[in-house]
Amino acid sequence: MLHVAPERELADLFQRISALTYLSGDLASGRALEQMDITQIQYPEGTFDIIYCSHVLEHVPEDRKAIAEFYRVLKPGGWALIVIPISREQTYEDTAVVDPQERRRVFGHPEHVRHCGWDYIERFQAAGFAVTLEKPSAYLNQAQMRRLGLKEEPLFFCEKK
């Protein structure tokens, strides 16, 4: 399993699963087991069975490249669970917005590079994924969702067939 930008509580949980070979990666050094740029994952094709990535792609300027890398490093039959904040129908991006204060004004956060829309399904499909939408509340109660930092937002279940 590859856990991107690991949340401490989830990382601890995943690492306790004895049947799971766990790896975490983050662009920032020291925040994960390995420093990793998800637009250039340093593992061969078909390495991972599972990828978990929550609230990361809205920070990545080349998100399509990251999605393609997720597809590349997954084994056939593998899957990725990806959480992104959906705030509109169509994704809005403006690469000219680089100042953190302006990003906060335009995108709602100083490190976001876009407002994500429902058209993200098409971005995942363009990389080759079969996509199913899930809701956290179908699997977790409200207390568990709060503890894990999840809201009632879509979970993109992306399979490599």
Image: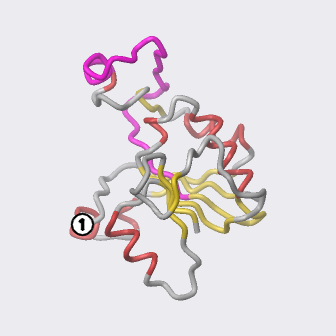
Q: Position of residue 159 (x, y in %)?
A: 67, 58
For label 1, the crowd category at 10 Å Cα-Cα, with few meaning under 14, some 14 to 19 and many 20 or more, is few
Q: Nearer the viewer, residue 135 or 37?
A: 37
Q: Is residue 94 magenta?
A: yes
Q: Is residue 27 left or right of residue 132?
A: left
Q: Is residue 100 left or right of residue 49?
A: left
Q: Quadrant of the N terminus?
A: bottom right
Q: Give the residue displayed 58% in from the left and 46% down from the top.
A: 38
Disc 1 is placed on an element classified as helix
Picture quadrant of residue 79? bottom right
Q: Give the residue displayed 46% in from the left and 28% down from the top.
A: 89
**Residue sitting at the far front:** 29
Q: For the image shown, how many numbered marks are present on the structure?
A: 1
Q: Is residue 147 left or right of residue 138?
A: left
Q: Position of residue 113 (x, y in %)?
A: 43, 26
**Residue sitting at the far bottom:** 18
Task: Give, as a single range, the part of the protein colored magenta.
Answer: 81-106
Q: Which residue is mark 1?
A: 147
Q: Is residue 123 magenta?
A: no
Picture quadrant of residue 5? bottom left
Q: Quadrant of the C terminus?
A: bottom right
Q: Amino acid at mark 1?
A: Arg
Q: Position of residue 56 (x, y in %)?
A: 45, 44
Q: Position of residue 94 (x, y in %)?
A: 46, 15
Relative to residue 27, is residue 47 depicted above or below?
below
Q: Give the residue displayed 70% in from the left and 49% down from the top.
A: 129
Relative to residue 115, is residue 48 depicted above or below?
below
